[in-house]
């Protein structure tokens, strides 16, 4: 029985979609995209009443051959910020970090960044070419790739420009927008080493240039040490085929390094003895310093963390009392060893609890439970990795790099929790 | 072959495992033909590797640019609307609003050729001929004052003689550039006397500035 033909209920039910607006809407926060909404409960479904779902049969197994999230989760979507880029084909959207938990990002929510739209490739016509300084240039079909020994690895992928809009100061209200250019999935694929060795590397092979088969022909230079260390050519994410927007049918995985290098729709790898200085490693993805010089080949994503709840899109709706603070931490240099959080803007810090797998170059989930007294809070988190690196403040970064870097902003994020539970993005002294 | 020998051979193959570095040991893939490689191998390096035969003048480039590029990048490569600016921006790299163009920022000319051929015009990539590409690159050099002679012709032969103004503007990755825990143990209690809010976010669905300028925000 579907909803529309179920019998009228005797008890008047307030709209499920009734939004809890007032009270939380501080400082225009309600206008922020993705602001959490809580519905009024329907007494018909509450004890001692017996809800429809307990009485009537639900839909059968043929209802959704490919399952989708509950309709009540329709707010959990990627979002874009229209004014960030001139075209929709070369643009980005953001992972809704505030709606997720654990360390794995669902495939449909992994942020997208592409420079020439999503290439629509069919697996039959997919080819990967290896040429340049190799003994024998090769062409692989997708089926060929699947005949190599496979590995499964969980890695985060972060765009170098994640938090790039915040170099000049707090700008976007929502961790989806400030930190949502990161995702973490399990890749299944072939170590790149096997593929390169199949063609045979010449002794002067020092760099590779992966190239995408999309309309941007995305190309980057990757040093051979990294290529032979932990790079993969992946064809599955979280167990199923890569999503088109993530490079179907095959992409490069470059663990811990900036997302732009993880070339999607991978069509070719050229082996060379020097870097190419492609547009994406000169005009873009170089970090301009205050003195006008720019750093290049800034590949690693340094340790970073963010509190995902509470955050501007996920205010505290339950009032004072027991409160769960949670967030994500990651490092391109290995495992996260510790995360500290502060509730009072850095006067006092507490060690957070990391829960779930702690894998190198993967997201880590942390929690800190506390009893909220209903007063204003200034929340921050600070991550440490196994190399002894500690996440810096934004001002520490500005002191060495200025404000023009765009990329690699891994500074500590501050959220201001107001007495009404609303949260805003701020910076503090 | 005796059954015993067969087993031995099999064991040898298996014990080779996956660590060995000899070429072609999985026997996967097939050799790429020179024609196949020529069709896909489009990259150009600073040392000139990958440049095809061809040539084009500033004046020829101006015509192609006006037809295929100006609608987005402006007649003079100054950028139309929000589309990328390709010329100018000198002496802005230290300012609050750096304008990173081919002339003000790009270290090597090969990048201009490589990128334009592989990705432009936006929506019709890899459609230019080598001569057209050389001509457009010559025009962009002219618009960026790297060459000043309208008669200038760029070709495979003279390509690597051109140096870009900001070639020395790039340095190596300087990270880690903030103190490590081994150097400074972060404070845990009574770390500050008072805390003030110094900056507040604007609300994202409000267009930041009327002219579409986003105060240095660029996420490319």
Image (tube, coloured by chain):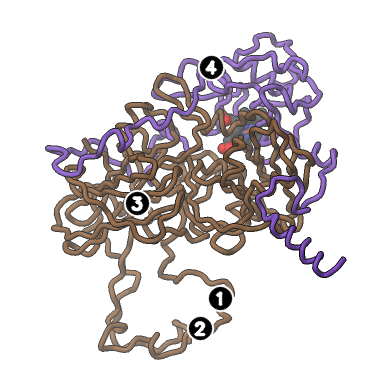
Chain colours: A brown, B purple
User: Relative to residue B81, is residue A221 drawn left or right?
Assistant: right
Mark 2 / mark 1, whichever is N-terminal: 2
What residue sits right under mark 2 in the picture?
Answer: A59
Q: Residues within 10 Å of mark 4 (few under 14, many from 20)?
A: few
**Nearer mark to the viewer, of 4 and 1:** 4
The CA span between labels 1 and 3 is 32 Å
Residues marked 4 and 2, same chain: no
Residues marked 3 and 4, same chain: no
Marks 2/3 in contact by CB < 8 Å: the verdict is no
What residue sits right under mark 1 in the picture?
Answer: A64
> Does dot 2 land on a helix, a strand or a loop?
loop
Residue nearest the viewer, comparing A213 with B181 = B181
Q: Which mark is residue A32?
A: 3
Vertical arrangement, residue B76 with respect to residue B120, above or below: above
The CA span between labels 4 and 2 is 66 Å
Q: Residues within 10 Å of mark 2 (few under 14, many from 20)?
A: few
Q: Chain of mark 3?
A: A
Residue that appears at 15% across and 38% down: B192
- Furthest residue to the right? B1
Marks 1/3 in contact by CB < 8 Å: the verdict is no
Q: Chain of mark 4?
A: B
Q: Quadrant of residue A292?
A: top left
Q: Position of residue A288 (x, y in %)?
A: 45, 26
Residues marked 1 and 3, same chain: yes
What residue sits right under mark 4 in the picture?
Answer: B168
């Amino acid at each position: 029985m579907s909803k529309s033909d179920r019998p009228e209920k005797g008890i008047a039910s307030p709209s499920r979609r009734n939004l809890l607006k007032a009270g939380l809407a501080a400082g225009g926060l309600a206008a922020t995209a993705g602001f959490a909404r809580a519905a009024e409960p329907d007494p018909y479904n509450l004890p001692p009443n017996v809800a429809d779902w307990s009485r009537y049969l639900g839909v059968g197994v043929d209802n959704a051959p490919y399952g989708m999230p509950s309709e009540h989760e329709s707010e959990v979507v990627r979002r874009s910020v229209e004014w960030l880029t001139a075209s929709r084909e070369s643009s980005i959207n953001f992972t809704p970090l505030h709606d997720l938990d654990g360390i794995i990002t669902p495939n449909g929510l992994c942020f997208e960044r592409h420079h020439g739209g999503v290439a629509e490739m069919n697996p039959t016509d997919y080819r990967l070419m290896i040429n340049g300084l190799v003994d024998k240039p090769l062409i692989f079909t997708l089926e060929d790739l699947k005949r190599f020994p496979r590995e499964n690895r969980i890695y985060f992928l972060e765009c170098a420009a994640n938090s790039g809009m915040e170099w000049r100061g707090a700008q976007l209200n929502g961790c989806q927008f400030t930190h949502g250019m990161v995702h973490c999935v399990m890749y299944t694929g072939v170590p790149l080493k096997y593929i390169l060795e199949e063609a045979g590397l010449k002794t002067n092979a020092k760099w590779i240039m992966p190239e995408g088969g999309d309309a941007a022909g995305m190309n980057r230079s990757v040093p051979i040490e990294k290529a032979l260390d932990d790079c993969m050519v992946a064809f599955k994410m979280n167990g199923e085929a890569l999503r088109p927007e993530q490079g179907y049918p095959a992409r490069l995985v470059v663990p811990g390094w900036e997302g732009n290098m993880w070339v999607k729709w991978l069509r070719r790898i050229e082996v060379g003895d020097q870097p190419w200085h492609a547009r994406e490693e000169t005009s873009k993805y170089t970090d301009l310093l205050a003195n006008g010089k720019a750093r290049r080949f800034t590949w690693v994503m340094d340790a970073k963390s963010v509190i995902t709840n509470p955050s501007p899109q996920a205010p505290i709706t339950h009032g004072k009392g027991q409160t769960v603070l949670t967030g994500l931490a990651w490092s391109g240099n290995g495992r996260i060893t510790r995360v500290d959080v502060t509730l009072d803007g850095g006067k006092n810090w507490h060690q957070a609890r990391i829960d779930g797998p702690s894998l190198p170059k993967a997201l880590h989930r942390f929690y800190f439970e506390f009893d909220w007294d209903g007063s204003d809070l200034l929340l921050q988190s600070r991550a440490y990795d196994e190399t002894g690196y500690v996440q810096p403040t934004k001002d520490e970064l500005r002191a060495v790099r200025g404000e023009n870097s765009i990329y690699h902003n891994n500074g500590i994020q501050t959220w201001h929790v107001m007495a009404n539970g609303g949260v805003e993005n701020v910076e503090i002294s | 072959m005796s059954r015993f020998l067969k087993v031995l051979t099999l064991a040898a193959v298996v014990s080779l495992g996956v660590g060995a570095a000899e070429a072609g040991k999985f026997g996967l893939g097939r050799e790429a033909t020179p024609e196949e490689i020529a069709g896909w191998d489009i990259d150009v390096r600073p040392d000139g590797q990958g440049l095809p035969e061809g040539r084009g003048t500033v004046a020829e480039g101006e015509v192609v640019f006006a037809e295929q590029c100006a609608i987005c990048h402006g007649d003079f490569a100054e950028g139309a609307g929000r589309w990328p600016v390709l010329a100018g921006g000198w002496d802005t790299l230290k300012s609050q609003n750096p304008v990173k163009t081919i002339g003000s920022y790009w270290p090597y000319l090969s990048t201009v050729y490589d990128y334009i051929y592989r990705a432009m015009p936006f929506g019709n990539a890899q459609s230019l001929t080598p001569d057209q590409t050389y001509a457009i690159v010559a025009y962009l050099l002219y618009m960026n004052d790297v060459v000043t002679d309208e008669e200038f012709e760029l070709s495979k032969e003279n390509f690597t003689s051109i140096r870009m103004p900001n070639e020395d503007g790039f340095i190596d990755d300087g990270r880690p550039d903030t103190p490590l825990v081994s150097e400074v143990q972060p404070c845990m209690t009574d770390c500050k006397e008072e805390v003030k809010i110094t900056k507040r976010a604007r609300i994202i669905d409000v267009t930041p500035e009327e002219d579409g300028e986003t105060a240095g925000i660029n996420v490319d």
